[in-house]
């Protein structure tokens, strides 16, 4: 395998895995949040901008109408004021005065092209030289003209006839003058008060150039593909972004040409005199749009404003792009920040990760990174160092403790061997004596215990049996046991009476027994020839007597106090006769007090029942069977006390 292949298959280090997870989680979660915010803002922007576009269309339509009204309203007032003045004075004004008023009107209002005062020929003042004095702009100066020109041809013109028949001021339909100027005329009737009512005498007119209307409509902030229009009362376009339509087409003529009933309905709504708003497909641009309209208060005209939805959507997309780019920039900064933070965290963690296998393998001299700062990673690094130092101390202490324990265990094993050497363990112990069967078992609960048994011959006919249980466990009990055994053997060399032997052994043990230790002990001297048994009991469990017919008896009397606590105690000697085939079982309380996992004791009842089945067995088989039954009762429970048993059976003499 090549070096390149090896490198490509090398797994990620713990540092890179942790850092990559932090980056992936941060970028993923932040990216999802960013997408959610962008989408939410997109739909929110769309709703808000759509509402704003509708409000803008309404506002601009109403604002444009107000702006036009603000220009036309004062002119209406001036013309109506002149008409009212001439009517109240019954045309009794000098012609020069009328011309002066007209000239003042033109000088004060640049948008006014001309103004005329036209009267009925029959009512012309005597001092007037013309029927209809007309003042108009002629370049930088003012020109004068008589619209009547001696024949009163104006009487049939709309600007004169409509106020006459309607009895009120009136705006004419927009028109284009011979000079190409867009015009509209406002006419106010001159009414002379009479006893029979107002008498129509003529009109005062005002010709207004409409170029400024195009400027107002063009300057409306309607956005890309948006525009404004101005309709007359008959639906004629007074202002339109397409010059070929203004003054040449009406909304109804275009509807007829396109056979568009929808456009016809919109036109009717716009000239109805009521404001409105609807969603509309512009016939000029074919863009979905919002169309709003508002009537003027002065003339019977309507201002319409159209805001393109396509341009609105483009604006929304631009805003969304800006927001997305800003969010991506923020996400990039966040990822860089997280990478830097993750790097500062993962570097010491990587060093700790690399050192951990060395520490776990037992190399406690492995170098650890130096803690930087006081954050959690630094605390973890410090904890690793403390753990390493504590492990080194613990291992050192453990080595010392283990060595000491090994020494103690070795000494305990030696003590165990010595203790086991103190009791007879060769069976049969007297192979040349066919008149008896003798076997013993001792199992300490620990390495060394406080139980002991012993047997030895005083002479060719007498056998001493003894079993004892020292208080406590372990080494102290074993030492007390060894001392008791030594005293017992010494005293039996002096006196063969069990009661007196126990009395002297008790006095020896009580002397200097500050720890107040004690031992229960049963001992017996058996004359093998006739089966006579002398025995004494110092607080020990009563031995069991197994008769030849299988009956069980307990040797419970006499019984004295345990050896050791108090001096000057007396012990009685009991007597019995063992018939050939009868047996004695000596045992410690580790037998009857053996417990199962639930705490139930083995007990004397189960002991007697078990021994009844052993009448035809030798001592060795009988004790092993008894020990197996004790273990079966205890199951998996720990052995709580030493188990010691001695069984003696008198056999018939074969001599």
Image (tube, rainbow, N blue to C red):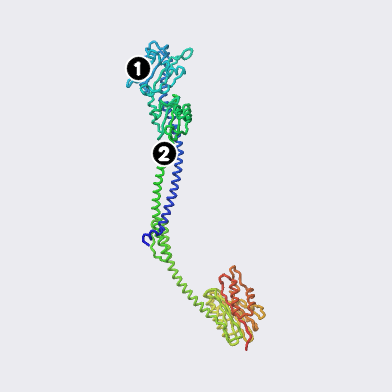
Relative horizontal placement of residue 159, taking residue 554 as reference (left or right): left
Q: How many marks?
A: 2
Seen as rendered, the residue at the extreme left is 140
Seen as rendered, the residue at the extreme top is 126
Picture quadrant of residue 100 = top left
Picture quadrant of residue 163 = top left
The image position of residue 649, as x and y in percent, is 62, 82
Residue placed under numbered mark 2 in the picture: 314
Above or below for 86 versus 290: above
Above or below for 185 versus 463: above
The image position of residue 175, as x and y in percent, is 40, 23
Residue 144 - label: 1
Is residue 566 visible in this depiction of the protein?
no
Question: Is 36 in front, or is 437?
Answer: 36
Above or below for 550 versus 165: below
The image position of residue 158, as x and y in percent, is 43, 19
Label 2, label 1: how far apart the Cα atoms are: 55 Å
- Select label 2 or label 1 by which is in front: 2
The residue sitting at 62% across, 73% down in the picture is 603
User: What secondary structure is found at the residue carrying circle 1?
Assistant: strand
Picture quadrant of residue 471 = bottom right
């Amino acid at each position: 395998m090549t070096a390149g292949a090896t490198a490509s298959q090398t797994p990620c280090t713990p540092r890179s895995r942790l850092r990559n997870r932090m980056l992936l989680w941060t970028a993923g979660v932040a990216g999802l949040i960013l997408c959610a915010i962008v989408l939410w803002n997109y739909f929110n922007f769309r709703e808000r901008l759509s509402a704003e576009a509708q409000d803008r269309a309404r506002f601009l339509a109403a604002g444009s109408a107000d702006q036009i009204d603000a220009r036309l309203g004062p002119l209406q007032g001036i013309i109506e004021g002149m008409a009212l003045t001439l009517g109240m004075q019954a045309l009794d004004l000098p012609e020069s005065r009328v011309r002066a008023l007209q000239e003042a009107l033109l000088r004060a209002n640049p948008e006014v092209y001309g103004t005329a005062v036209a009267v009925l020929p029959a009512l012309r003042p005597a001092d007037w030289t013309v029927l209809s004095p007309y003042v108009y702009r002629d370049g930088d100066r003012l020109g004068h003209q008589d619209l009547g020109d001696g024949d009163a041809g104006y009487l049939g013109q709309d600007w004169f006839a409509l106020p006459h028949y309607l009895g009120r001021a009136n705006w004419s339909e927009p028109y284009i003058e011979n000079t190409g100027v867009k015009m509209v005329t406002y006419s106010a009737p001159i009414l002379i008060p009479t006893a029979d009512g107002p008498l129509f005498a003529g009109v005062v007119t005002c010709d207004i150039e409409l170029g400024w209307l195009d400027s107002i409509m063009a300057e409306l902030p309607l956005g890309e593909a948006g525009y404004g229009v101005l309709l007359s009362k008959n639906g004629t376009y007074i202002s339109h972004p397409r010059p070929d339509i203004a003054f040449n087409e009406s909304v109804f003529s275009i509807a007829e040409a396109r056979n568009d009933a929808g456009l016809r309905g919109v036109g009717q709504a716009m000239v109805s005199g009521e404001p409105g708003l609807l969603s509309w497909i512009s016939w000029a641009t074919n863009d979905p749009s919002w169309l709003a309209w508002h009537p003027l208060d002065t003339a019977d005209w309507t201002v319409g404003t159209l805001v393109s939805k396509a341009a609105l959507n483009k604006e929304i997309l631009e805003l969304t792009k800006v927001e997305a780019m800003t969010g991506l920039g923020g996400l990039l900064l966040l990822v860089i920040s997280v990478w830097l933070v993750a790097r500062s965290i993962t570097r010491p963690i990587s060093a700790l990760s690399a050192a951990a296998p060395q520490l776990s393998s037992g190399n406690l001299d492995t170098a650890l990174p130096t803690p930087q700062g006081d954050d959690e990673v630094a605390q973890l690094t410090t904890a690793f160092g403390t753990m390493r130092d504590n492990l080194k101390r613990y291992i050192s202490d453990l080595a010392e403790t283990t060595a000491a324990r090994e020494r103690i265990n070795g000494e305990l094993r030696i003590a165990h061997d010595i203790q086991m050497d103190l009791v007879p363990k060769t069976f049969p112990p007297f192979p040349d004596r066919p008149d008896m069967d003798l076997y013993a078992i001792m199992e300490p609960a620990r390495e060394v215990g406080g139980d002991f048994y012993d047997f030895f011959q005083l002479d060719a006919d007498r056998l001493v049996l003894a079993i004892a249980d020292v208080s406590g466990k372990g080494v102290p009990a074993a030492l007390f046991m060894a001392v008791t055994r030594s005293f017992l053997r010494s005293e039996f060399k002096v006196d063969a009476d069990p009661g007196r032997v126990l009395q002297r052994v008790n006095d020896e043990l009580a002397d200097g027994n500050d720890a107040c230790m004690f031992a229960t002990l049963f001992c017996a001297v058996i004359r093998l020839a006739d089966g006579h048994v002398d025995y004494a009991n110092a607080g020990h469990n009563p031995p069991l007597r197994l008769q030849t017919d299988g009956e069980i008896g307990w040797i419970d009397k006499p019984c004295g106090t345990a050896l050791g606590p108090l001096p000057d105690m007396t012990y009685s000697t009991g007597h019995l006769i063992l018939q050939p085939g009868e047996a004695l079982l000596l045992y410690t309380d580790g037998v009857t007090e053996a417990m199962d996992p639930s705490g139930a004791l083995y007990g004397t009842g189960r002991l007697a029942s078990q021994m009844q089945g052993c009448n035809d067995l030798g001592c060795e088989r009988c004790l092993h069977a008894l020990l197996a039954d004790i273990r079966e009762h205890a199951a998996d429970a720990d052995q709580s006390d030493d188990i010691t048993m001695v069984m003696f059976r008198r056999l018939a003499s074969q001599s």
